[in-house]
């Protein structure tokens, strides 16, 4: 019986070892499956998080582009204003000189060649500047002081009608032309 007990004990030890090996294999398989499932879940969560971050980045890129376009438009508007102001200053600085006024009157007389009589209304200071000069004017031209006309400009009355050659009108038209070009139109 001792032999039988020893054999049963050996059999039990073998069975226990087999159960331990089977339990270790089951545990190892469970760990592997759990790890795989955890990895899959983590990967899905990471992909979802990355997709959200990409959406945020695309939204930010769109906002940056919109802001850039807006800032560029504002800069272009400002440049148009600066260009117009610079031209106004340059033209305004030379408009009241004697030579410029004489050239203006001669050009008007030449352009209005079919008119029998021309009355040119100008600022009193411009009239005084022209009258200080001994250069004779076209006989059809009558000069008249008009304080409603700014320095450097004039209004021309003839039998054809009235020509508005005031400096402020011409500069205003220049400003409108600059804005038209800026807004995609033609001047």
Image (cartoon, rainbow, N blue to C red):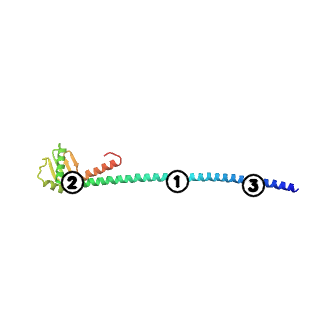
Q: Nearer the viewer, residue 155 or 53?
A: 53
- The answer to whether the residues at label 1 and label 3 have Cβ atoms under 8 Å apart is no
Residue bearing the label numbered 3: 20
Q: Nearer the N terminus, badge 1 or badge 3?
A: 3
Q: Nearer the viewer, residue 27 or 109?
A: 27
Residues under labels 1 and 3: Cα distance? 48 Å
Left or right, 127 with reference to 7: left
Is disc 1 surrounded by few (<14), some (14 to 19) or many (20+) residues within 10 Å?
few
Q: Position of residue 76 (x, y in %)?
A: 35, 52
Q: Is residue 108 left or right of residue 75?
A: left
> For numbered disc 3, what is the local secondary structure?
helix
Report if residue 20 is visible in the image.
yes
- Residue 71 at x, y = what percent? 39, 54
> Residue beneath label 1, please?
53
Disc 3: CA contacts within 10 A as few (<14), some (14-19) or many (>=20): few
The residue sitting at 18% across, 47% down in the picture is: 107
Q: Nearer the viewer, residue 4 or 111?
A: 4
Q: Residue at x 43, y 52 (%)?
A: 66
| Residue 129, numbered label | none
SS at badge 1: helix
Q: Residue furthest front?
A: 3
Percent x, y of residue 17:
76, 54
Ranked by sequence position, the earlier of labels 2 and 3 is 3
Q: Are marks 2 and 1 in contact (CB under 8 Å)?
A: no
Residue beneath the point at 23% across and 55% down: 92
Seen as rendered, the residue at the extreme top is: 114
* In this picture, residue 7 sits left or right of residue 88: right
Q: Residues within 10 Å of mark 2 (few under 14, many from 20)?
A: few
Q: Which residue is mark 2?
A: 94
Query: Of label 2 and label 1, which has the lower sequence position?
Result: 1
Where is residue 182? Give x, y as percent.
34, 49
């Amino acid at each position: 019986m001792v032999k039988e007990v020893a054999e049963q004990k050996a059999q039990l030890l073998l069975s226990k070892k087999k159960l331990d090996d089977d339990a270790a294999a089951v545990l190892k398989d469970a760990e592997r499956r759990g790890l795989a499932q955890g990895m899959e879940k983590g990967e899905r969560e990471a992909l979802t998080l990355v997709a959200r971050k990409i959406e945020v980045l695309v939204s930010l890129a769109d906002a940056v582009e919109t802001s850039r376009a807006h800032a560029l438009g504002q800069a272009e508007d400002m440049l148009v204003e600066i260009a117009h102001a610079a031209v106004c200053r340059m033209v305004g600085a030379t408009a009241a000189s004697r030579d410029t006024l004489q050239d203006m009157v001669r050009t008007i007389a030449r352009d209005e060649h079919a008119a029998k009589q021309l009355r040119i209304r100008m600022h009193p200071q411009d009239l005084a500047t022209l009258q200080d000069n001994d250069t004779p004017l076209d006989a059809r031209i009558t000069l008249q002081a008009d304080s409603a006309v700014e320095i450097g400009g004039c209004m021309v009355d003839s039998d054809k009608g009235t020509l508005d050659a005031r400096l402020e009108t011409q500069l205003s038209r220049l400003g409108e032309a600059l804005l038209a070009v800026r807004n995609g139109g033609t001047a």
